[in-house]
Image: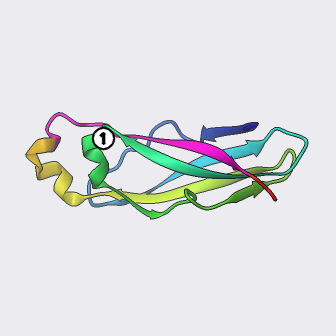
Amino acid sequence: MPWKFTPTQREVRVKPGESALAFFTAENRSSAPITGVSTYNVTPMKAAVDFNKIQCFCFEEQRLLPGEQIDMPVFFYIDPEFETDPKMNGINNMILSYTFFKVNDD
């Protein structure tokens, strides 16, 4: 898929229980309109249960015209129980990643 997808900031520091915003930018680098949809992943996998999306562009179709660029925010929080959960000892970072798939325009 000829989209450039990048985080606006490489890192967001979040305290468990506090909501936060992360921004991404998507750009259609092709000469045709493209509709895409994304899935997300959180690693380490065992910490993914503590990552809570409030609002996200994932799983929603996004249509970009040729050369169009848009900002895509993610509003989220880390469960406040994260800090006291013994299974999370030693986990200080979570990585949020996205995979985009082209949607066929029939």
Q: Quadrant of residue 62?
A: bottom right
Q: Residue furthest front?
A: 106
Q: Residue furthest bottom?
A: 54
Q: Which residues make up the magenta segment?
A: 88-103
Question: For the C terminus, which image quadrant?
Answer: bottom right
Above or below residue 80? Residue 26 is: above
Q: Amino acid at mark 1?
A: Met
Q: Measuring 26% from the left and 37% from the top, which residue is drawn there? A: 92
Above or below residue 93? Residue 71 is: below
Local secondary structure at mark 1: helix
Q: Measuring 11% from the left and 51% from the top, which residue is drawn there? A: 84
Q: Quadrant of residue 88?
A: top left
Whole-percent x and y of residue 75? 47, 60
Whole-percent x and y of residue 19? 38, 61
Is 89 contained in the magenta span? yes
Whole-percent x and y of residue 73? 57, 56
On the rendered structure, is 87 left or right of 30?
left
On the rendered structure, is 66 left or right of 64?
right
Q: Nearer the viewer, residue 84 or 43?
A: 43
Q: Is residue 94 visible?
A: yes
Which residue position holds label 1? 45
Q: Residues within 10 Å of mark 1 (few under 14, many from 20)?
A: few
Q: Measuring 62% from the left and 54% from the top, which residue is drawn there? A: 72
Q: Measuring 55% from the left and 56% from the top, which residue is drawn there? A: 58
Question: For the N terminus, which image quadrant?
Answer: top right
Is 79 contained in the magenta span? no
Above or below residue 19? Residue 38 is: above
Q: Nearer the viewer, residue 51 or 21?
A: 51
